[in-house]
Image: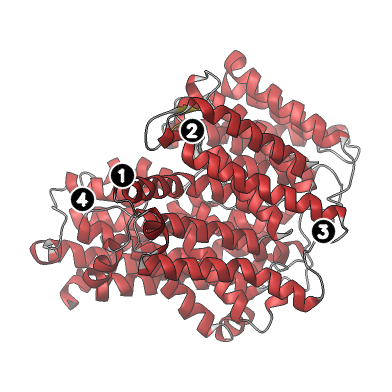
Amino acid sequence: MAALGFIALGAWVLYESRTYTEFGAVFPRAVSMVMILAAVVWILLVMVGVGRSAPGERGVLWRPLTLMVVGAAWALLIPELGFVGGSLIGFLGAMVVAKFHSWSWLSWLGHMAVAVIVTVAAYALFAWGLNVPL
Amino acid sequence: MLGYLFEALTPFNLMLAFMGVVAGVTIGAMPGLTATMAVAVLTPLTFTMEPASALIMLAAIYMGGIYGGCFAAVLLNTPGTPSSIATTFDGYPMAKRGDGALALSLATMASVVGGVVGVAMLLLVAPPLAKVALAFGPVEYFWLAVLGLTLVASLSEGSLLKGIMGACFGLLISFVGSAVIGGDLRFTFGNPTLTGGINIVVALIGLFCIPVVLDLVTTPDPHLEFSEDKHRGFRLMEAVRQMFGQKLNLVRSSAIGAFVGALPAAGGAIASLIAYSEARRSSKRSAHFGKGEPGGIVASEAANNATVGGGFIPTLVLGIPGTPPDAIILGALLVHGIRIGPSLFTEHSAIVYTFIFGLLIASLLMLPIGLFLGRYAFRGFVAIPKALLVPGILLMTILGTYAINNNLTEVFIMLALGVVGWVLARAGFSPAPIVLGVVLGQIAEQGFVQAWLIGTASDNLLGMYFGRPISLVILTLIVLSLGYPLLSSRLKGKLVQGSD
């Protein structure tokens, strides 16, 4: 599937490069052709049984998918709530996704305290230590 | 000469070197922060210092920053800088099996030796090596970039063909934005942020770090293995014994790093990959490389720290900065009224030689600092529960990405690349070739197009690409690097390895 994706991407790049000047098109075209060739050879090798597709990592998928949503929400919240506010909510959201065992109320309190401390410390490092305008 | 050494050893300069190394290591160890950032942010602090002291501090930060990249590479499978990509191949597997402290000790010692060799090259052979660097033209840089890509494609997990596809994908990512020659706006979709292209650090964090974070939450198992009986302090004697067994690897990798570092813009990534590839090829334990072989870490870290000294050769002799930190340090030299060029070593010998000795001292200071930090870094890191580790890493990556250009769009790009990298990783594609494609894309394209222009104008296109002596040497290495995995797997009885 990934190899097919690369072929499609290479074809799209070749199509897009029609509108570029010669200087801007020559190298992307060369790279696309190499990529398509490599993908075609890979597919052929898999079809004849010489190349094997990777089984990849296993494990539950709902957590990483939820974490992707949390990450996107985190970045969207920052302009609305500021870095500290947005990052606190994002931090807590990611914390819940990565929580595998049940916690006592004391454990919850401890983790939330750490979330606040880490977020504020990181903000301080970047905003005051590294002069990043947050 | 001894006078300059004593000048570098004054308490004030020693303190600056120490602080510089600590700051550099700390910043270089965090994903999202780079050696370039560390040098850039701290440069203004040095404007009121004596020139030699200012340069010692900046060089110490740079050296520490390059070395610090190994911490994230070993503990998080995320290179702190592109120079540490090859360190992830064996550093992370070592950490996963509980040898993280040993991996960090080895990386520390290899970095110290590499740093010292790089400085020695700078001291002894700077002017002649600079002449060799000048012999590298556009086509040589193009083939050098291709060599780096074919090496990483053949070295990383998964098949060679997947590595090539990944490298090409990385190159395509590097084409986003304004073309290096011609200025065409490519693949920007009308977005002003994409006009400036996709930043290398954004791609590095996204493709390496985010997949690690996503994988962390797929299972409740601990991130890294840790056992008390394995964790005996610094594991220093064990690391020293390993290092003694890697003497040839150490010297060879340091020399490769210093030489490649002397080529402007070639960078630590290519140096460490060439050194790693050569270490694997010549090792009796080559089958263990990529699975936690100490020789792999030694090669990568010795080479990437040697590029620091090597990179100052074109910077000081020719005024051509080898890397972005070199450019910043060059700027700092100009602020202090020091003119670059062949006469630098005569007109400003006091400052230059004091600086070079300061670089040597910074390399040596990495040993106690690195061993101390490494021991507690591994212990501390393993102790962090996933419920805090995952959001902590996300926080650093988001803040670090935003800090590059103060642009939230780049945070979204980083997250999107991370998701793509995670999906590709599950399909058996290693992130290393993709990231290296992004890193080397501009160098490769500039060399390719310039050589194409010259070859077309002189009506000798084929001769331009395939007729120059240095190009032929690099081409031979490319063919060998492509042929090695095929030959190796044929000897093992299979044509292409699948990854699992």
What's the residue type where badge 3 is placed? Gly
On the image, the x and y values in percent for residue A82 come to 57, 18
For residue B372, which quarter of the picture?
bottom right
> Does residue B480 appear to the left or right of A7 in the view shown?
left
What's the residue type where badge 2 is placed? Ala
> Which of marks 4 and 2 precedes in the sequence?
4
How far apart are the two marked residues, 1 and 3, measured between alpha carbons?
52 Å
Observer able to see residue B107: no
In the rendering, which numbered label is found on residue B118? none
> Which of marks 4 and 1 precedes in the sequence?
1
User: Which chain letter goes with mark 4?
Assistant: B
Q: Name the residue under label 3.
A: A51
For the residues bearing labels 1 and 4, Cβ distance under 8 angstroms? no
How far apart are the two marked residues, 1 and 4, measured between alpha carbons?
11 Å
Viewer-closest of B41 and B382:
B41
Q: Tell me the residue at 78%/40% (across/down).
A: B387
User: Which chain letter goes with mark 2?
Assistant: B
Q: Are marks 2 and 1 on the same chain?
A: yes
On the image, the x and y values in percent for residue A60 come to 90, 41
Observer able to see residue B26: yes
What colouring method underlies this structural image?
Answer: secondary structure
On the image, the x and y values in percent for residue B224 come to 76, 58
Mark 1 vs mark 3: in front: 3
Q: Do labels 3 and 2 share a chain?
A: no
Task: Work out which residue is located at the far left of the displayed protein and give it.
Answer: B347
On the image, the x and y values in percent for residue B120 come to 32, 75
Q: Name the residue under label 2.
A: B403
For the residues bearing labels 2 and 4, Cβ distance under 8 angstroms? no
Q: Mark 1 points at which residue?
A: B43
Judge whether A68 appears above or below B466 on screen.
above
> Which of marks 1 and 2 precedes in the sequence?
1
